[in-house]
C-alpha cells in the first residue's frame, strides 16, 4: 500500500493540473465569445484577448498532451480538444 504522504502529493499535483486545464480552456473560450466585439477595447480586454489566443494555441498544439502527462491527468487530450472545438462550433479545426 502506498504511503499516505505520497497520496497527498499525488492528489495535490492532480488538483493543480486540473486547475490549470480548466483555466486554460476557459481563457481560450474567451476569444470566441468576445471576438465579435469590434469596438475600441480597453487595455485589459486586449491583454485578455492575447492571453486567450495563447491558450487556444496551447490547446491546438502538444501543450495539452504535455499537461496531461506531467500532472498525471487521466483524460484523453484529443477528446478534450474535439469537445472544445464542438462547443465553439470550430469544425474547421477537426
Image (tube, grey):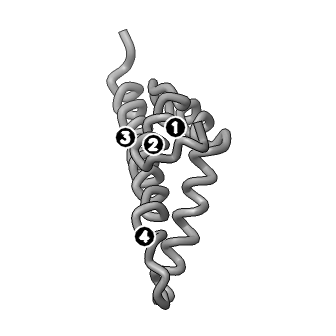
Residue for point 66% across, 39% down: 62
Foreground: 38 or 82?
38
- In space, the residues marked 2 and 3 are separated at their CA atoms by 21 Å
Residue 41, position as x, y percentages in the image: 48, 87
Q: Position of residue 20 (x, y in %)?
A: 45, 49
Residue with the most extreme right position: 62
Verify CB contact (< 8 Å) between mark 4 and mark 2. Answer: no
Of mark 4 and mark 2, the one earlier in the sequence is: 4
The residue shown at (53%, 33%) is 68
Q: Measuring 37% from the left and 29% from the top, which residue is drawn there?
A: 5
Alpha carbons under labels 2 and 1: distance apart: 5 Å
Tell me the CA gap for discs 1 and 4.
20 Å
In the depicted structure, whether residue 26 falls above or below residue 85: below
> Marks 3 and 1, how far apart in space?
20 Å
What separation in Å lies between label 3 and label 4 (alpha carbons)?
A: 29 Å
Q: Earlier in the sequence, mark 1 or mark 4?
A: 4
The quarter of the displayed image where residue 11 is located: top left
Quadrant of the image containing the N terminus: top left
Q: Secondary structure at mark 1?
A: helix
Disc with the residue nearer the chain's start (2 vs 3): 3
Residue holding disc 3: 15
| Disc 4, SS | helix
Disc 2, disc 1: CB below 8 Å? yes
The front one of 66 and 25 is 25
What's the distance in space between the residues labelled 4 and 2, CA to CA?
16 Å
Q: Determine whether the residue tagged by mark 3 lies in a helix, strand or loop.
A: helix
- Image spot of residue 21 (x, y percent): 45, 45
The residue identified by callout 2 is: 84
State the residue position of label 1: 81
- Marked residue nearer the N-terminal end (3 or 1): 3
Give residue 34's mark: 4
Between 39 and 41, the one nearer to me in the picture? 39
Amino acid at each position: 500500500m502506498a504511503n499516505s504522504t505520497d497520496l497527498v502529493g499525488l492528489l495535490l499535483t492532480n488538483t493543480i493540473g486540473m486547475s490549470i486545464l480548466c483555466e486554460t480552456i476557459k481563457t481560450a473560450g474567451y476569444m470566441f465569445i468576445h471576438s465579435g466585439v469590434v469596438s475600441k477595447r480597453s487595455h485589459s480586454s486586449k491583454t485578455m484577448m492575447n492571453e486567450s489566443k495563447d491558450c487556444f494555441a496551447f490547446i491546438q498544439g502538444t501543450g495539452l498532451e504535455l499537461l496531461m502527462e506531467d500532472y498525471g491527468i487521466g483524460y484523453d487530450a484529443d477528446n478534450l480538444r474535439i469537445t472544445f472545438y464542438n462547443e465553439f462550433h470550430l469544425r474547421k479545426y477537426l
